[in-house]
Image (cartoon, coloured by chain):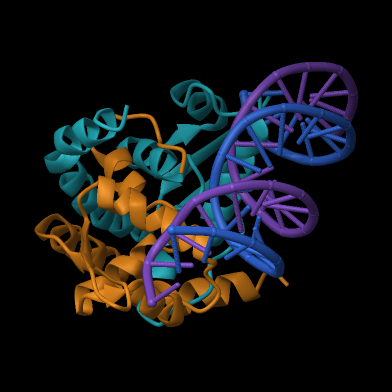
Chain colours: A cyan, B orange, C blue, D purple
Amino acid sequence: MKRLQQDGCGLATALNAIGGKWKTMILWEVNLAPRRFGELKRLLPGISEKVLTQQLREMETDALVRREVFPGAVQKVEYSVTPYGVSLNEAIGVLSHWGKQHEQRMAAAERNLA
Amino acid sequence: MKRLQQDGCGLATALNAIGGKWKTMILWEVNLAPRRFGELKRLLPGISEKVLTQQLREMETDALVRREVFPGAVQKVEYSVTPYGVSLNEAIGVLSHWGKQHEQRMAAAERNLA
DNA sequence: CAGTATCCAATTTGATACTG
DNA sequence: CAGTATCAAATTGGATACTG
């Protein structure tokens, strides 16, 4: 992900954190429960392994998720949300709420173009 | 702008509304005061006329901004924020706030990669 | 299982010249 | 002034095969 330029109001930082088509959904899933790599792949139909890996690595760098390896006969890696991730998820919730209130209207506006 | 698929939680709607590199800044500017096309071009260094036009049209479709033409010897077009735009701007404010609180930490994390 | 490595396609953004 | 029209460049996302 290319990072946006800082804008002095903090928004670029937040948008960088959720940039990429899947990060908000990944954050949502690991917020519900710790998830394994394969589990996330299954929960996010359509995502490729490459992209899932990329986004997880970036979120790990941003300390939104934590990656833990459990050694064993079968390798196991678990991704869980950090307190930072929890707080970001809450901020995102406000946006979701806005979207929920406006989705009917926006969808109608789109349709009226056709 | 390609629109995201609806996701049932409203987030896609909100992200579509602010999708595109410049929409949040455009919204911010017209929220401060009604702006003319040329004024926005000046206030958003680096944006091309094509992109500015596109994003304004989409925001107009979504009823986030209102476009008014004032006829005269010299043509004048003014863009102003709508109540919908105001409410979206407030939701975005929450994200900005999160970003503001985390930008030092995130910037440091980025640096530690190098 | 949990990734990497490649290669490719789709989109988005940008530069620029032109117009009513 | 306020755009349109083109063409090109930059990114991102996706499909797939392979590995420890």
Residue B75 falls in image quadrant: bottom left
Residue A82 falls in image quadrant: bottom left
> Does residue B110 appear to the left or right of B76 in the view shown?
right
> Does residue B46 appear to the left or right of B63 in the view shown?
right
Position above or below: A24 against C10: below
Residue A11 pos. (x, y %): 37, 69
Residue D6 pos. (x, y %): 68, 47
Residue C10 pos. (x, y %): 62, 31
Q: Residue at x 43, y 44 (%)?
A: A80
Residue B64 pos. (x, y %): 22, 55
Q: Residue at x 20, y 58 (%)?
A: B88
Front-lying residue, D9 or C1: D9
Residue B89 visible to the viewer: yes
Position above or below: B29 against B59: below
Quadrant, the C terminus of chain A: top left
Q: Residue at x 48, y 41 (%)?
A: A21
> Does residue B61 appear to the left or right of A53 in the view shown?
left
> Does residue A108 appear to the left or right of A30 in the view shown?
left
Q: Residue at x 51, y 65 (%)?
A: B49
Residue B21 visible to the viewer: no
Quadrant, the N terminus of chain A: bottom right
